[in-house]
Each structure stands twice: as C-alpha cells, then as structure tokens.
Amino acid sequence: MLTPPFVLHRPKSVEEACAIAAHLASEGRPFDWVAGGTDLLPNYKWHLNPKGDVISLAHVDGADALASDRIGCMARLHDVATSEVVHPLLAAAAAKVASSLIRRSATIGGNLCLDTRCFWYNQSEDWRRSIEWCHKADCGTGADCRVIPNQNTLCVATYQGDMAAAFMALGAEVELVGPNGERRMPLEDFFELDGMKKNVLQPGEFLLSVHLSEDATSRVGAYHKLRVRETWDFPEAGIAASWIPGDAGSLRVASTGLESIPGLHADLVDAHEDWTEKEGRKRLSKALQKAIKPVNNTVLPPRYRRSMVSVLASRALRAIMQED
Amino acid sequence: MVGEARVPMLPHAPKTVWKADVNDRAVAVLAPSNAVLLDVLRDNVGQLGVKRGCDLGTCGCCAVLVDGQPRLSCMTLAGDVEGCAITTVEGLADGHHLAPIQTCFAEHGGSQCGFCTPGFLISAQALLVQTSSPTLAEVNEAIEGNLCRCTGFQPIVESVMAAAALLRGEGEAPEPPTHPHADPHPSGPDEPQLPPGHAR
Amino acid sequence: MSGGYRQQPGGAGGGVRKDGKRVAGKLRFTPPGAGGSRPVSDPRNLDGIPESVGGNEPQPAGHHVHDRLRTGTTVGQATALVDANAKITGQAWYGDDVRLPNEIIGRILRSPHHYARIRSIDTSAAEAMPGVLAVATGEDAPKTFGVLPVTKDEHAMAVEKVRHVGDLVACVAAVDEATAMEALGAIVVDYEELDPEFDPRKGLEDVDEPIHWRGKYHVGRTNVQKRVHQAFGDRSNIENAAASSRRAWRFEGVHHGFTEPHAVVAHWDANGRLQLYTPQQVPHYTHRALATVLDVPMHQINVIRTFVGGGFGGKSDPFPHEMCAAILARKSGRPVRITFDREEVYWINRGRHPSYIEVKLDADEDGRVAGLDVDALIDGGAFASFGHVTSYYNGVLATAPYELGSFHYTGARVWTNKPASGAMRGHGAVNTRCAVEVGLDDIAEQLAVDPIDLRLANLLPPHSRTISGFRITSNGMREALRRVREESGWDQKFRNMPLGKGIGIGCGFFISGSGLPIHWDPNRFPHATVHIQVDMDGGVTVHTGAADIGQGSTTAVAQVVSEVLALPLDMIHVRSHESDTSPVDLGSYSSRVTFMNCNAAIRAAMEIRESLLNAAWDMLGYHPTTLVMVDRRIVYKHDPSVGVSYLQALHKAQEDKGALIARGAYRSPPMGGVHKGAAAGLAPAYSFSAYVAEVDVDVETGLVKCTRVWAAHDCGKALNPLAVEGQIIGSCHMGLGQVLSERMTYGRTGHLQNANLLQYQIPSVHEMPHVTPIIVESSDPEGPFGAKEAGEGPLLPILPAVCNAVYDAIGVRPSSLPLSPDVVWGDIQKRMKSEGVEDPLDLESPRLTHGPLQEKLASRAEEHYGRDHARQRTEDTSPYVNGVLFGFDPTRPIDEQLEGWAAIDDPDPESMAEMGYAGRAWLKQEQRHMEGDD
Ligand SMILES: Cc1cc2nc3c(=O)[nH]c(=O)nc-3n(C[C@H](O)[C@H](O)[C@H](O)COP(=O)(O)OP(=O)(O)OC[C@H]3O[C@@H](n4cnc5c(N)ncnc54)[C@H](O)[C@@H]3O)c2cc1C
Ligand code: SF4
Ligand code: FES
Ligand code: FES
C-alpha cells in the first residue's frame, strides 16, 4: 500500500516546527503533523485526506519529556506504560492501547489528536469509491454521511483513543503551541464535537504537552475498556474514573470510544454524590449510560456498547474504591 | 454514479539519499520523502526477510529492531529513522551462529508456514535482550502485536521460553533443526578416521 | 563483515558455544563418499521399531503392513521441519519475495459495483501514460476456468458482467506501483448497474438476472448453483422419539486469514515458456487453468510454487490474478509481479460459506440417534469455486461417527453478489458438525444423561460402513473421548461449576484425502506420484509435487524416505517447487497429502530399498529377507557384524546403470455406493477427534474466554508428533476464531465492512487457551505407517465444545456464530427476562441429575468398548454396517430386512421444503424440465 506522495519535514525544535508550519501556510500548502505515525500512516495508505506536506514531531527537542506533572506529546505509550513516574492510571491505560509493538511508536500527542473512526471511512480508496464516498472524505462529491443519512453536514465518526479518558479523569490540561503562541486549557475543552474537526487546534498549531496538577497525584483511578481481543482492538467503550480517596465529591468520570469526542461527565457526577453507596453507584452508572449515545460505526453494535457503559462504570467505581 | 475522484499518486515525492545501519552494514539508498521503512527495507535495501502481512499494523510480520527497540516497519516513516541501527531477521544470526531464539523456533515448532516468523523472532529477541527469565505474561505481552495463523501461539511461547532457558545456561542446546541425530564432523578431534564406505 | 547468516563449509564440527549459540553451516551436509557425516553408524533404535517386527514400539491398535519397512530412523519422532532454517533466517522466499531482473509491477482495477453489466472499457488513456507497459481486460482472456471442471465460471477479468465489489475488471503493468495505480485511474469503464442480491435466502427466488446462467440445468430463474438431497434409513424410527432437538443456526462467513497475502510473479522466458511463481496449495490446478486461459499447452508452462505463507484452503483455487500476471507479462515482455493488499485478499475470499443450517436430532428411548436431519443453505458468493463439493460436505460428513437410524439431508448453494466462498480448513464439515454436536448436548440434557456417555454408546466401530456407505477403516473416536474425559477431569466438573464457568464436549469426523480426484482426465491417473533419484554421492533426491504450506508435508516425505532407507534426514533432499521437475500431485487440499503422498513415497522408497538389498545379497550372499537396514548399513539379521555399508550397496546397485531411479504412485481404492453424490465424502480413511473445552463467561458483558482445551485427535499414526501437535493447537486457534470473534461482516448495503485484520478479529495470543494436545493412534491399515490426516479434522470439535461449555456456564444455548459478546449478552438478557431475574449474577447455571437411561448407556458403551477393541485389532473381522445398533443383520442387505429402510426416496418437493431453507430449493424445476421456457 503506497501513501500518496508528500514531503516530510523534520524540525528539530518547537520554533523550527512553527516556522515550517507558518511557511507552508503562507504558501497555501496544507499539511499534517505526524508523531508516531501509527494512525496517520494507515489513513494515508487508505488515501484518507492526505496532504502534500507532513511535519514530523519526532525530532523536536524535549517533546518526549516524561514526568509526573508533564508529559510531552512525543512520549511513547510504551514508555508511559512502563514508567515509574507517571500516574498509575495513565500507565494502566497506556498499556491497554493497541499492541505492544504499536505502543513502541505510538505517542501521547497522537493518541489525543487521533482521527475519529468509522467503518464507512477507515477503508481503502477503492472501497470508499464503492459506497460513493461519505461526508468525511467526500472527494469533492458532497457525499452524505452513511451512518446518519440525509444530512451532509455532520460527521459522527467515533473518537476511539484510550488515553483521553484517563487524562480527563485526572484533570489534565493540554498545552498547545502554534504560530500565534501558546495556550493552555483543560483537556475536556480541547475536543470539539465534530467528527471532522475533532479538536480546537488551529491551522499550524500542535499539542506540545499534557500537564497534571498536584491534585492528580493524590488521586486513585481506574480505566475499564471494552474490547473483544486484549490487543489491537480500539476501545468499543471506555470509562475512566478517579477520586481522592475519602472525598466523594472529588470523583471525576470520563468516557471514550462512544461518541465523536471523549467526554467528562461532571454534571452527572455532581448529581450523584452518594456514589460510594451501592445503590448510588448503580444510579450513577445508569445515568451515564443514558447520557451517552453511541452510533453504529464500530465493530460492536451501539445498543450493546451503550449497555456496557453502566457495567464498565460500576466496575471502575468499585475499583477506585478498592472494593475488589 | 460512483465517484471517480482519485488521489493522485504521481508525480513521485522528491527523493533523497537515505542512510542507516542495516544489520551492521552502512547503507545508503535513494528513497522518496514519503517512504515507509518497510518498503525501503524490502525494495531498496533488499531485506526480503522482513515481511508485509497487512501494511496496517495488525500482524507484526514487518517488525524490525530500530536502535534495539522492536518497531513495525510498516508504521514507521523511513525519514524518521534515518541514521538508526536497524536489525532485521537476517541480522539475528551472529555470523555463523544462529541466535538461540532461532534454533528454538525450529526445534519447538514455533514456525510452520514461516511467514510470521521473522516478526516473532524480532519481538522475542527484543524481550530476551531485556530479560532471560521472562514470565509467561511478559512473553505474551511481547508477542501480542504479532499474528500467527498456523501455530496457535503455544509453540511460539514455548520456543521463547526454551530460548530464555538457553540464555540462562539451563537446558541442553537444541539439536540442529534439520537433523535429528547431530553428527559430529568426521574430522572431529576424537573420531577415528576410516576410509569411506567401511563403517565399522 | 558481520551480520547475516552464512554457511560455513569446513568449520569445526557440531559445536555449541558456551553462550548457547550454535555453529551453523557444517552440520547440515554430508561429505560425499562417507555415506553419511559420520563413519560410525547408529545402532538400531528399537524404540522406533514396532513390536510386530521385533522392536519395542507398542502397537495397541494392532500391526501394520508397513511395519517391516520401519528402521527406527525418524518416523514417530518429533522432527523439526526440514525447511525450518530457511524460515528462521529470513531466507524462505514467498510470493512477493521473487524479484526477477527487470520486473514491473501489476495492479488490478476492481469493480466498485456489486452487480453490473460492463458496457465498455476504454483503456487508451492508461496505455498512453509514460511508464505503463501493458493494460489488459477481460477481452484478453475470454475462456472460463474454475477449480472444479464441472463449474468453470470464472474469468481472468470480468467479461460482460461484474459480480461483486472487488471483482476484477482490468489490470495494468507499469514501471512502479504509483504509476500503475495512476494508470488504473485513467481506465474508463461504463457500467450498467443491475439489482444485486446479498441474502442467500432470497437466492431461492426467481429473478430477472441470475448471477450466472447454467442453461438447461439452471434451477428456475433462481440463483441456486447446486442443490443436493440424500435420505437413508428408516424414517419411522423418529416417530416415537424420546427426545428431539431442532435448531436453526446462522453461521457467518469466515476467512482463512493466512498471514501472507496473495502474490504472483509471471515471466515468459526466452523460449516462450511461462514461468509462474505463486504461493499455491494446488499448483497443478493452476497449471491446468493457465493452459486453458492462455491457450498454451501445459508443457509450455512451469508453475513454481514459492514458500506458502499459510493456505488453509484459501490458496487452492486457480486465481484470476495469476492469469492477469501471465497476460500482462506476455503483453509487456517483462516479468510482472502482482501483490495483494490485505483488502484484496478478502475480495478474492474463498473462505467458509456463510450458512443457514437447520439440524434436527431425534433419540429413541434407548438413547439411540433415531434420526438426523440436516438442511444447509450456503452462501456461495459470486462464483462456484469448490462449492459443488461444499454443498455435499455440509450434509454427508455428519453421517459419522454416530450410528444413525435415519439420515436426511437437503442442501443448496446459492450465488450472491459477494466475494466467492470456497474451501476452508474443515471444508464443509465445520458448521454442520457444530450444529450436530450442540444438538446432541441438548438431547443428552433432555434424556438426563452425560453427553460423553451418550456419544460413547452410539459410536460406529472400526471397520464399518456409515449410513451413506462410507467405508470407515481405523477409528479412534472411542479412545479420544475416553482420554479427554479422563484428562480434563470431566466427571468432577460437568454441570458442577459456578455460574460463568463451564465445560463442554465436541467431536469431529473428517476425510483423510478425497477418494476421487477432481479431474478425470487422464483416466485412472494417480492422485500422487513421487520420484526418487539416488546418484553416486549417496544423497537421495525426492521429487514430489506436494505443496508444503507450512503443515510440514516436505518434512513428512523426507521422513518416510529416510525411514525406509535408514538414512539420516540430511541425506534426503526434497524438490517440490517446480512443475517441470515434480511429478503431478493433486495438491494440498482435503487433507490428502500425508496419506497419499507419503504412500507414494513409501512405494518409491521400497523400490530403492529392494535394489539396495539385492546388491547386498550379491555382495554378502544372504537373501534380502534375512537382511535389515540399519543406519547407513545393511546387515545380516542374525549377526549384525556381517554387512555392507549403504554406499557399498549403492555403488554395487549402480554398476552399469548409474543413478537409481524409482517411482511410486498412489490411487485410492474403489469404494462407495451408487447413489447420486455417493462420491462426495468418500475417503480412503477418516480422522476422528474429541475435545473438551473450558470457558469463563463474563455474565455482565457477555465476553467469553476459553481457558483450557483438551484436544484428542486420531491421526492414525503421528509420523511427526511435533507437526501433529502443531496442527492440533493451530486448529484450536482457528476454530476459536470462528466460534468467538471472526466474521466477514456485510453491512446493510452488502459491502464487506471489515476487510482488514483489525476488524476481522483473529484471536491474539491473549485469547488462546492452554491446549493439551492428545494424539490418538489407531493405525490405519492403508495409511503410510498407519497415518491419517491431522490438518483439518482437529478444527471441527472446538466450535461445539466451546458452545456446549457456554451452555454449561450460563445456561444459554447459542444458535449463531460467532459468539461475540453482544450476542451472548443478548442471550443472557433474554434468559433473564424469561426467568424474571434482575441481575445476571443471580442466574443459575444448569445442573444434571442422571436419569434412568444413564446406567443403560454406560453399560452399552462398556460393551461396545470390547467390540471396538477386537475390531480395531482385526481380531473380529465380521462385517458391520450402520443399522446393526437398530437390530439389523449386517451380513444381509439392510433393505431386505426392513421395509422402512431405504436409500434415497424420490425427492418430494413439498416435504423437502419443510426441512428448511435449502429444502425449498427443490420447489423449483430445472429449465430442461420446464416447458417452452428458456
Ligand atoms: C492496529 C492498531 C490498533 C490500534 N489500537 C488502538 C487502541 O486500542 N487505542 C487507541 O487509543 N489507539 C489505537 N490505535 C491508534 C494509534 O496507534 C494510537 O492512538 C497512537 O497513540 C497514535 O499515536 P501516533 O503518535 O502514532 O499518532 P500519529 O499517527 O502520528 O498521529 C495521529 C493524528 O494526530 C495528529 N497529531 C499527532 N501528534 C500531534 C500533536 N502533537 N499535535 C497535533 N496533532 C498531532 C496527526 O496529525 C494525526 O492526525 C491503534 C492503531 C492501530 C494501527
Ligand atoms: S460518521 Fe458519516 S461522515 Fe463520518 S466517517 Fe462515518 S459515514 Fe463518514
Ligand atoms: S505488515 Fe506491518 S504489522 Fe502487518
Ligand atoms: S507460522 Fe504461519 S502464520 Fe505463523
């Protein structure tokens, strides 16, 4: 499988990366960032929205930082999973991503900026031609969405990255850099409910690192992932939860693999302060299930994935209470 | 009407000289900017032992060691690993000496059709360099990115365990894979020399 | 220079370094003249020589005609594959590794439509592109081909119509892949879309435009490709059934999932001969098809089988892309290489048929299987492939290992606009077997008996005949069942484990080679032929056409030759890659290779052995009957110090003649009945297997995990136990895939949604249970040294074993595969609803209290144990046919004894339609029986 032709740029520093991005923008040349390439390369091999230029972040100095309070975008998931310094919830979630071989290449930044997925979309060019394309890669035909037809404005492809839920549950913030400088925001604000745009990154901007506050270190967390095989498979549903033991109000619950973006469920959690009791936990799990509406574009049917939300949630909640 | 749009594949991306150390040999080949390591290794460097099973990260047949780390060459941009030391299955043997993991795969039935074998050898070798007494869980994790459709994995796990035992200096070195009764060479030190055809 | 693996002639011998690395190189070869690497030959290995000829190898199943050929050299010993070194060093050359000088790259243009008529194809723009060397379309090769001569319905590229998304339309060869892809985009095809059909059930209805047209044999205007009906036995037996089980199953299609995608290299050499390199399981049929399609005589084609990166049936059809490569190479005058993307592998498919199967089992008050009715509607996709045979196998391979009171089968295969189904490991037998074994579990539950005892009390004995007339020779079913029962601790665990944990049993029965070849011409041509050549250097070259696809057939051939001639394996060189040099072998399908090819090899080796013994007779004066072959020596039986070396005897035998050349061939003996379809399922021997599986079911999520498997397989005799165990464990893995997660998912638009290895979920190392392989050796009288197959049969039992274990764990009985978590979860929800249970953890798992029949069955099983033992050892040679259990005298024709007992009624369409979907195929008439309609 060949990727369409592109020029690979390999900046050595953040400044150089921004400069290349600015230069390409000034010439009107669209480009993509690439980190480990484990998501971008399959998409390019399938000819999914390829660009003529690709900027690799692999050689950007310091981008692979790995510390308890800051993880660089180029930190490899293998290193996160085996690290002694990162929060155990992150290590555990990283260890569940893809396969051990892929984790050697896969990065934190790539995982958070993962393209959304859909079985009408993650297919070869020949395959997509046979369905006359879909909205997300319409090849200029204005094609419809195949999941929710008769509307050609919205893509509901599913975000299936594992790390986002774990990071959100720990209250992580992301640091973005670009031609217009740096900005920082809570991870939950980074995502944008749009299967095509996915997140708030502006042209030329990239995710530099993820920050964790003091508060995160004292949290106990769990991540439960629904998948058929214990390797390779993307999350069909994933629930992460964490709290500061003893402080029921500190609970954070996030979900992934279910909708176009991962979600932090702050309001629902606030409404169920009694979650440390069995019944309250049940109610919270059910409420989560009700709030999340997966669609039919992954391996398992949406009805089932939705039902699993409450099972995963109650398991995660039980786990962080260290009841089993 | 089925859409006719096609992503253009031509003109080729600009080519540059790609340099790396492949199996302890310095190589320099002309490769396009968008080249994937797997293609460069197979088509330009000629390491046909690296296999393409899926090209999408799902089979592990294309695994190679990049600076000692097992990586999927189909998921790696050649440009990103320029100047690195790359080891393919062809480089596992040290001169005339097969690596223990290689002989153990032959002896324990870790290879049937053999197409997945190069990838498994690389994943296993990377593990064995780290530890010579891996647990079952560690072996499983090391090879979870490799797919084998023939062996059912069990003989592969056994091969890795046997190789680990060899590295620890336990257990007998396996017999040569193609020969059930290893015959010492006739001119070996303590073998009597007899004329051909006059055994005993 | 360092790095890389090199041979090292002349180095120090045999050494293993302290660090465990072994010196390679010198070990492998034998200097000429010595007749072996070592001047001192090994003493006779009595442990490898059977009791019957004075050795120590026990023979519980009796002696064998090949016993006297045993020399204790390699047979029965765990032997590494003889080509393992190539595989572990990266030197093995698979399809895409063939790189000829000046090669160009071929790519294929595929149909974007499910079903369409091609109005026109314009290739002029593509041809004009710089770097494009050849373009071809269906017009370049109008002749049809197909693996079965009765159903040749494929073209190299579409002629007139495309029949599924991904069907081949045109192909291009260019200087590089990018140019070829670009050129494909420049080909303009004008299609007229037709109404596609994806549901095989609708394939039974008349349509305007059937996917193929069979002329006067066409069934109505439907898409039925083949329909089958068979009935035997006494239907009245089922009227007073004490228990009956009827289940309608749905099996999704599954794919072989071999790791090596298809690849082919074609090159017309300077003499105008085609050299075609392809990873084929069945090079001979490709050879035939190429000759037809390219219109050149077979002898002008050399088919070179590369190493095959897994086949499992998926590389056994002659393929259109093989034709394309040859056509492009002919047009361009350059070698052309075509390699598939993984997606294209799914488009060419030939995987297991998606099927609707209905199985009805009835048991009488004695716990006998009074009736087995099977109705199988199988979805053939767009082409016939092996489907003609599959249609039979789905029924007839269910006629053993149990004795049946009656058997009724209706089967139909329909064309749909999907990639073609074909042969896959366990061809045609897997799905029905699963349904039958789950049905038996149900029957056992109703009768309140142990399902293993139910099976043990209903087995056909060795040397018997099935209800449909198959000749069973050796039969290790009983031993297999007894051993898994014991080793798994069945009696303590069954119906005794907590909720979510379960154990289940399943059995299997499979052909060991198909009794009849696919092609009839030339008449009475052997199924397998082996040539052996021994020149003055003493090395033995074996020429065979058997295709090693990783199962170790090359090793098996080397082993049997080495065994007969008492030579170390490194003196045997197997040449099997080229049709120019290898005698015709029908290929690696139907689990025929070990049985047929090794038999042929033994015959050829016997000839060489005879020449050597005669030469030794000349030299020693002792008659050959008093001589024995020892490691590279021929000695006098009663005084082993008297003898000649192998080389001395060889050189004597070669005097005035030169190299010894011998040939051995195998053709299966005539057998079987005379009814329509009697030939399908006939085999010179059958394999048997019994598995016990343990599962953990997560009752909240429905995730099923198989944790342990005890797998007993009767392979006759394990020539190479390492290979047999590898086949058993590998089969478990593949079967587990089908039962737990694999499916070719066709979405609501008929598109294959998961043509990749991410969403086509083959179990990983984490999903693999620990398998205990148990080899049962029933010593088949006609098998080479007693061997039968081990490549396909071991797959069958794992499916029902897991299904039955799931029932034991959570009390829901599956009726569709795969048991993906959503399906199991759905079943659990249903059970909860029907029992009014809120929390799945409150469900109860099934329990068993033995009923009155249990005692009776156990004692019948015990009786039969003695019966079978005597028959297996041919101490009892009386005839036995299916029906004896129901009171018939096997020495008289059954139908003379009871009115109700019949073979094949005339099909009565109305009653057949009640059988299920496939039966309804008989409601239509063939065109030739229809009036005035064509
Ligand atoms: C077989 C297979 C199985 C997989 N299974 C899983 C799984 O179970 N769970 C899971 O979460 N993922 C899975 N993945 C996806 C992927 O491997 C991981 O998500 C990985 O972490 C992506 O990281 P990367 O560095 O390789 O991303 P890349 O491919 O380099 O990038 C992914 C996307 O993010 C953009 N990007 C990358 N870095 C940045 C940045 N710093 N700033 C802005 N944009 C950026 C890229 O432009 C690209 O669009 C799987 C992939 C494969 C091939
Ligand atoms: S959700 Fe709709 S638009 Fe988005 S990728 Fe899937 S089919 Fe296309
Ligand atoms: S070819 Fe790289 S993982 Fe399959
Ligand atoms: S040995 Fe064939 S795929 Fe592993």
Image (tube, coloured by chain):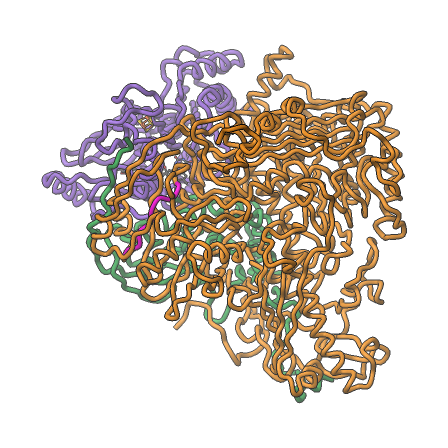
Chain colours: A purple, B green, C orange
Decide whether residue C169 is among the magenta residues. Answer: yes
Decide whether residue A19 is among the magenta residues. Answer: no
**Who is closer to the viewer here, A14 or B162?**
B162
Q: Quadrant of residue C387?
A: top right
Determine the residue positioned at 64% across, 31% down.
C410
Q: Eyeballing the image, is C467 above or below A8?
A: above
Q: Eyeballing the image, is C848 above or below C563?
A: above
- Please state the extent of the stretch shown in magenta in the rendering: C167-174
Q: Eyeballing the image, is C885 above or below C532?
A: above
> Most prominent secondary structure in the magenta stretch?
strand
Residue B68 in percent (x, y) is at 40, 56
Determine the residue positioned at 39% across, 40% down.
C166
Residue B168 visible somewhere in the drawing: no
Determine the residue positioned at 81% across, 25% down.
C364
**Who is closer to the viewer here, C805 or C439?**
C439
- Is A236 left, or right, of C586 in this rendering? left
**Who is closer to the viewer here, C910 or C32?**
C910
Q: Quadrant of residue B41?
A: bottom left
Residue C755 in percent (x, y) is at 42, 38
**Who is closer to the viewer here, C452 or A124?**
A124
